[in-house]
């Protein structure tokens, strides 16, 4: 078995046992990226030199007995996470030449943990999309079938882990962007409680919804990466005081007596029949293992997508105002100052980003604010309250992650509404700031189906434990894409 086939936990063990060096691990992934990523297009930038430098630093930690649980295990980063001295594009032409002068908090944490950074992965421009087709550079491809999308917006991060080009990656999730691509690529993706991972250095999309989170081949790997990147950060005013997530007890859980709520709204006709059957089959298996399930109704779910498409664009319209061709990235010349800004923004933002800036600006404008933004915030509060209520009685809310499996590249470009409805199941967790994890639960038409578990605020450790016992209960080892 080659090094790149090992998962993060196995790699960390081999590194600690001196069976392999940090350089060898990094070189194995770099050479696989070089020979194979042409098929998947998961990376926008590969940082071979930086990764080797990081590997040497990791080796020094290991040699001094100062290594942690992931020391020497490489990570790929979504390209909306700022990296000091390394191009960070958000897959947008407007940041084509932008090189941040600082590291995001999570990058500092990865350096401290001794995790080499392999490079930056593709995404939908500014994380706006669900298929990676909105990247201004190229779409990424699903390792299960390269004619299909990997999902989005963290599509490159999901494809990289699934294609064994990286054992772990980071994504960001505003409405489902970690969990949905994880589901479509057959890996695990976790969005922590809002405020447990610092957003300092994450290029902001919808600041009240955005959260950075880990992606890995199994729950344990993913939990270890969550532990490595989480923790309070004074540079993020929404960072929680007890932010650190512990992975120490992730294997301690049991399915016996665990109670799951099944919202009937998330098993309705919007869900593809094959996906629903797959999740229902998994539920039967978990029932035999001692878990309990009960159908509930969370009616506000029906308004999730509509509410999200007011709040996220509103916040984006404000956040993206800073890209004016003066402070970041390239500048196009026009008539005077206003002309420069208009040329730059008009030509270098892609169509989906412009659409959202316009929708958001409209929703926030005088006279419409109460009708749209304020109203959306009220629905958001209602949705969070309905979920909180169910957490009084249940350990987690369970549903499919995505209503569909991976679909053909180009297949939904003429149906933007359908593309937006894909986040139907994942949006509620962002609305309430809840921790939420997607893990593989079977196949439909030979393509991966994800199961979504959502828990209460600050219940990350318990949710990860539950996910670990679900993974065990389903008795499925990590399944490699058949074409690898
Ligand atoms: N697909 C959603 C959107 O297009 C969510 C994206 C995200 O979570 N970043 O906005």
Image: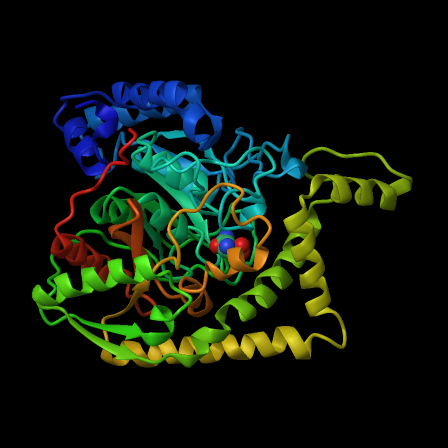
Residue 309 spot, x, y in % from top left: 58, 64
Question: Which quarter of the image is occupied by the N terminus?
Answer: top left
- Tell me the residue at 35%/53% (across/down): 231
**As drawn, is 193 to the left or to the right of 199?**
left
Q: Relative to the observer, which residue lies in front, 55 or 126?
A: 126
In the image, is residue 271 above or below residue 54?
Answer: below
Residue 352 spot, x, y in % from top left: 64, 50
- Whether residue 187 is visible to the viewer of this picture, yes or no, is no
**In the image, farthest residue toward the right:** 335
- Whether residue 144 is visible to the viewer of this picture, yes or no, is yes
Residue 380 spot, x, y in % from top left: 50, 74
- Tell me the residue at 18%/30% (across/down): 65
In the image, is residue 447 above or below residue 383?
Answer: above
Number of marks: 0
- Tell me the residue at 70%/68% (across/down): 364
- Tell me the residue at 42%/42% (across/down): 150
Q: Quadrant of residue 281?
A: bottom left
Q: Quadrant of residue 101?
A: top right
Residue 236 spot, x, y in % from top left: 49, 55
Q: Quadrant of residue 20?
A: top left
Q: Relative to the observer, which residue lies in front, 422 or 395?
A: 422
Type of colouring: rainbow
Question: Which quarter of the image is occupied by the C terminus?
Answer: top left
**As drawn, is 245 to the left or to the right of 120?**
left
In the image, is residue 384 above or below residue 66?
Answer: below
């Amino acid at each position: 078995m080659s090094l790149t086939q090992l998962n993060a936990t196995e790699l960390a063990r081999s590194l600690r046992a001196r069976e392999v060096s940090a350089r060898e691990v990094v070189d194995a992934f770099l050479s696989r990226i070089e020979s194979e990523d042409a098929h998947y297009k998961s990376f926008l930038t590969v940082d071979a030199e930086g990764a080797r430098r990081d590997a040497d630093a990791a080796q020094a930690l290991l040699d001094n007995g100062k290594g942690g649980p992931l020391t020497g295990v490489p990570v790929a980063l979504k390209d909306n996470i700022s990296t000091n001295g390394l191009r960070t594009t958000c897959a947008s032409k407007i940041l084509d030449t932008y090189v941040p002068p600082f590291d995001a908090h999570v990058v500092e944490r990865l350096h401290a943990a001794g995790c080499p950074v392999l490079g930056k992965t593709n995404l939908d421009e500014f994380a706006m999309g669900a298929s990676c087709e909105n990247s201004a550079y190229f779409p990424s491809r699903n390792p299960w079938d390269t004619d299909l999308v990997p999902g989005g917006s963290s599509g490159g991060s999901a494809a990289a882990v699934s294609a064994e080009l990286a054992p772990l990656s980071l994504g960001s999730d505003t409405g489902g962007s970690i969990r949905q691509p994880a589901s479509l690529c057959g890996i695990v993706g976790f969005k922590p409680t809002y405020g447990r991972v610092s957003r300092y250095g994450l290029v902001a999309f919808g600041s009240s919804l955005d959260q950075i989170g880990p992606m890995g081949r199994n729950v344990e790997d993913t939990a270890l990466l969550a532990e490595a990147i989480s923790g309070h950060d004074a540079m993020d005013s929404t960072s929680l005081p007890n932010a650190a997530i512990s992975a120490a007890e992730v294997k301690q859980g049991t399915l016996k007596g665990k109670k799951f709520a099944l919202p009937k709204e998330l098993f309705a006709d919007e869900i593809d029949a094959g996906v629903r059957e797959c999740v229902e089959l998994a539920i039967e298996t978990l029932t035999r293992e001692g878990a309990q399930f009960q159908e509930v109704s969370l009616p506000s779910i029906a308004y999730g997508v509509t509410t999200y498409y007011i709040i996220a664009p509103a916040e984006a319209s404000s956040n993206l105002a800073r890209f004016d061709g003066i402070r970041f990235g390239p500048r196009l010349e026009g008539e005077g100052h206003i002309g420069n800004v208009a040329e730059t923004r008009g030509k270098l933002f892609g169509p989906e980003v412009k659409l959202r800036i316009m929708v958001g600006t409209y929703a926030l404008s005088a006279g419409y604010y109460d009708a749209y933004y304020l109203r959306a915030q009220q629905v958001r509060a209602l949705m969070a309250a309905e979920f909180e209520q169910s957490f009084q009685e249940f350990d987690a809310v369970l549903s499919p992650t995505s209503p569909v499996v991976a679909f053909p590249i180009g297949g939904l470009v003429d149906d933007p509404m359908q593309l937006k409805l894909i986040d139907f199941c994942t949006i509620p967790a962002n609305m309430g700031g809840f921790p939420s994890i997607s893990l593989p639960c079977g196949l439909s038409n030979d393509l991966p189906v994800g199961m979504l578990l959502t828990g209460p605020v600050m219940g990350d450790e318990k949710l990860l434990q539950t996910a670990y016992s679900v993974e065990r209960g389903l008795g499925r080892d990590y399944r490699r894409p058949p074409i690898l």
